[in-house]
Structures are given as structure tokens and as C-alpha cells.
Image (cartoon, rainbow, N blue to C red):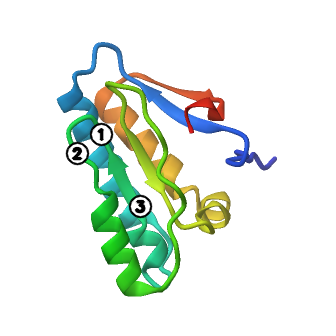
Amino acid sequence: MKSKVNWYEKDMLLVVDKATDEILTKLAFQVEGEAKVRAPVDTGFMRNAIYALTPLANNRRRAEAEAGAAAERDLAPEPKLDAHTAAVHAAAEYTIYQEEKVGFLYQALEKAQRLAGGVIQEVGRKHF
């Protein structure tokens, strides 16, 4: 039996109890790096368009520069985050198709969950 996560309607969230902004930042960078390593090889645009937004740092500009060097395409709009939250944004609009085939972002999130504990939850898109 095949399972599928519909990323058009749902987002995944790793909830870590009592995480500081520093811990959230480290976890987001862990997920960003792991997702880039696991991402299927493409022109480099999709891989370079993955970036972390955290309470302490935002890698959007670096992603724009690195992805833009690989291909002339726009990144998806940056998500809006609440205070004391972090996200890893895969900003190439076609990333969803590779995620459905490979699951590299979810695998990166699972690895972070194993490192930090916590629970992966399905959430609505209200934050984005």
C-alpha cells in the first residue's frame, strides 16, 4: 500500500517542547542541510532554493543568490512566521513533485525529530 502526503493542503511541523530560539535555529539549519543533501539532483535551482527562517537568522537572500545563479526563476513568497518559530522553506515551485516522489524534506524532518525528540504534527496552512 502506498501512502502520500498532500503538501498542497498540509504542512508538517516538528514540535519540540521548551525549545529555545537557539535550539529552533540549530534544528532548522539541520533540516535545511539534510534536505539539500537528500534532494534529487536537478539544475541546482531546487536544491539551492531550500532555506531556513529562524528567530536568529534568515537564509532567504543566500537562497535567492545561489538559486538565481543556477537558473533564472522566481522563488515562492517567503512564509510569515510567528515569534519563536522556525521553518525550512523549499521555495522552488516544483519542489512538491520531487517531494512526492522522494520524500527528501520529510526524511530531513524525521532526522531532526530523532535528534531533538518532539513530535511531528500535521498542521493547516494558516501560518503561511
Circle 2 residue = 57
Number of other residues with Cα within 10 Å of mark 1, as a class: few under 14, some 14 to 19, many 20 or more: many
Q: Is residue 53 above or below residue 48?
A: above
Q: Is residue 91 left or right of residue 36?
A: right
Q: Quadrant of residue 63?
A: bottom left
Q: Is residue 43 above or below residue 50?
A: below
The residue tagged with tag 2: helix, strand or loop?
A: loop
Q: Is residue 15 left or right of residue 58?
A: right
Q: Are marks 1 and 2 in contact (CB under 8 Å)?
A: yes
Q: Are marks 3 and 2 in contact (CB under 8 Å)?
A: no
Q: Is residue 19 above or below residue 47?
A: above
- The spot of residue 98 in percent (x, y) is 61, 66
Q: Quadrant of residue 85?
A: top left
> Residue 54: which disc?
1
Under mark 3, the amino acid is Ile
Number of other residues with Cα within 10 Å of mark 3, as a class: few under 14, some 14 to 19, many 20 or more: many
Furthest-top residue in this view = 18
Disc 1/disc 2 C-alpha distance (Å): 5 Å
Q: Which residue is depicted at the point 51% across and 57% down?
A: 104
Q: Which residue is depicted at the point 22% across and 22% down?
A: 20
Q: Which residue is depicted at the point 52% across and 56% down?
A: 77
Q: Quadrant of the C terminus?
A: top right
Q: Is residue 48 left or right of residue 11?
A: left
